[in-house]
Image (cartoon, grey):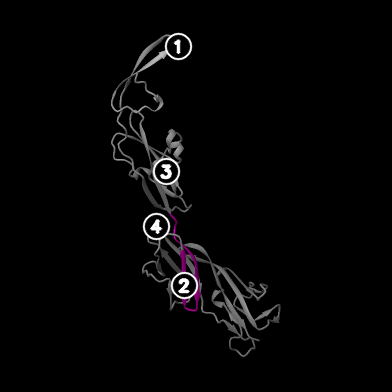
Amino acid sequence: MNEIKNPEKYHPLEIGDVYAKIFDSSEMCFVIAKISLVFFEQVLDSYDDKLTVCALKNGKGLFDLTKANVTTTLDVKIEYFSDREYALQGINRIENPNTFEASSSFVYVRISNEIGCFRLSKIELTVIPLVKITKIETYKDTATIYAENGVKPYLYSNDGITWQTSNHYKQLEAGILIFYVKDASECDIASYTVANFKLYNTISPNKDGINDVFDFSMLKTKKNLNIKIFNKYGEVVFTNKKDDLSFWDGKSKGRPMYSGSYFYVMQWTEIISNREENIKFTGWIFVKN
């Protein structure tokens, strides 16, 4: 009488004994075995948490998983896993949780007591990508800086000391300019170097002594200087040579070019903060013949 109908999922209300009736193969003879039920203390609490770090140069983050608040229960074993199934089975644990390198993802935590009872919690890992300057548009004595990644709002600087909320600068001096951007996380400060030269954007090569040539003599001493001028079809009409580094007279192979707009690309190497940086300066020049 009072047979337990579901021994596989038996939930007793209190600690006590249950009895098993074990028959032999004839099902005529049997013995009685006693099973004593003991309740062990379960892990009392477990919590999900979040960790956020700045990105490394490789785009990943370096996390100390032990800083996550996953339980307040004392004298428990805490293990970390990259997969929930691993955590359930207790396999392939993360061996160095203090220095865990990962992209934005989740880590699963197995919190267990001395007799093996456990609960799982989850840590959400977030990597803040480093702010990056995507481009800088210069026009005459102005510049506009564009950035991405990081955490908005951004702050901008043209000296690394004084910062402003606007990404636009006016009344800039000609020459090599370095702009800086930092985001709200202050994980990193991005820098970008541009050239800003006041070049005449129209030439009329009629030998009257006024704007006869496209003059870039200020770049003559630059290292690895490479200048190319293109027509509207993308064809190169001028390339600088060792014996001709200071101007373009509006001709290609000795022949005057048609009136119209031409695109130029100037590239060279600049020494900035004791390191070499490749500089690129582009623009349009109008030839009026």
Corner quadrant of residue 129 = bottom left
Which residue does the numbered mark 1 point to in the structure image? 27
- Going 46% across and 65% down the picture, which residue do you hit? 147
Image quarter of the N terminus: top left
Disc 3 is placed on an element classified as strand
Q: Specify which label sits upstream in the sequence, 4 or 3.
A: 3
Left or right of 199: which side holds 167?
A: left
Q: Is residue 259 above or below residue 26?
A: below
Amino acid identity at mark 1: Glu
Q: CA distance from mark 1 to mark 2?
A: 91 Å
Which residue does the numbered mark 2 point to in the structure image? 144
Which residue does the numbered mark 3 point to in the structure image? 107
Name the mark nearer the viewer: 1 or 2: 1
Amino acid identity at mark 4: Cys
Disc assigned to residue 83: none
- Going 62% across and 78% down the picture, which residue do you hit? 262
* Residue interval drawn in magenta: 128-147
Q: CA distance from mark 4 to mark 2?
A: 23 Å
Amino acid identity at mark 3: Val
Q: Specify which label sits upstream in the sequence, 1 or 3.
A: 1
Query: Is residue 140 magenta-colored?
Result: yes
Q: Is residue 123 above or below residue 76?
A: below
Amino acid identity at mark 2: Thr
Disc 2 is placed on an element classified as strand
Query: Is residue 193 magenta-colored?
Result: no
- Going 42% across and 9% down the picture, which residue do you hit? 29
Q: CA distance from mark 1 to mark 3?
A: 52 Å
Q: Specify which label sits upstream in the sequence, 2 or 3.
A: 3
Name the mark nearer the viewer: 1 or 3: 1
User: Which one is nearer the viewer's eye here, 233 or 8?
Assistant: 8
Which residue does the numbered mark 4 point to in the structure image? 187
